Image (cartoon, rainbow, N blue to C red):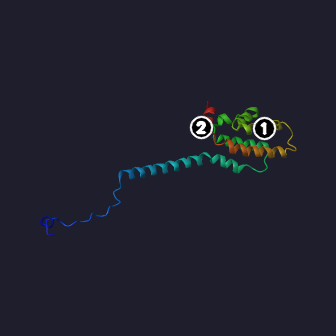
Amino acid sequence: MNNPALSELNPIIAAPAASWWPLAPGWYAVGILAITLTAFLVIASIRAARRRRVKRAALRALPASASLNELNLLLKQACMGYYPRKHIAHLTGKTWRDFLVAHLSERNAARYYDLLVEVEQAAYRPATNQQALQQRYAQFARTWLKQALPPSQQQRRAIND
């Protein structure tokens, strides 16, 4: 098979191996998206940790045996970490009770309302034999701190209005 046309052809040269660089434009988009998503998640987690910092500090500071006044003070300090001082510091008696109840779920609000009334009335009675009331109020304070803090933006806007 001596074909003169075949003798004029050059030998077959294999193509070089495909390189992984430069990447296709789609991979650049995926990389930018991954970096953006990672940055967003890091920023969101830092903000969430900062928002819960006051709540964690209040739960750590919650003593096992504290007076009713100490527990009220702790709750008010925790609230002032999230709400403006001018809206929280003046709350006493019925307004303080209503504020606490308003930030609980309906089930817990009904459960603790009588306790809050009893605590409000205990301020005007002698401090003797209030151990059981103090323990129940400490449990309420723990529940309230876990459930009500940090407040939603809607709750914060409502108190600023």
Q: Residue at x 31, y 64 (%)?
A: 17
Q: Residue at x 26, y 65 (%)?
A: 14
Residue 102: image quadrant is: top right
Q: Looking at the image, is 29 positioned above or below residue 2?
A: above
Task: Give the camera-side residue of 110 and 1.
Answer: 1
Secondary structure state at the residue bearing disc 1: helix
The x, y position of residue 12, in whole percent, is: 22, 66
Q: Work out which residue is located at the far bottom of the displayed protein and give it.
A: 1
Amino acid of disc 2: Gln
Give the residue pinned by disc 1.
116
Q: Which mark is residue 153?
A: 2
Residue neighbourhood size for the residue with mark 1, other residues' Cα within 10 Å, grouped as few (<14), some (14–19), many (≥20): many
Q: Work out which residue is located at the far left of the displayed protein and give it.
A: 4
Secondary structure state at the residue bearing disc 2: helix
Cα gap from disc 1 to disc 2, whole angstroms: 26 Å
Q: Work out which residue is located at the far top of the displayed protein and give it.
A: 161
The x, y position of residue 16, in whole percent, is: 28, 64
Q: Are marks 1 and 2 in contact (CB under 8 Å)?
A: no
Amino acid of disc 1: Leu
Residue 161: image quadrant is: top right
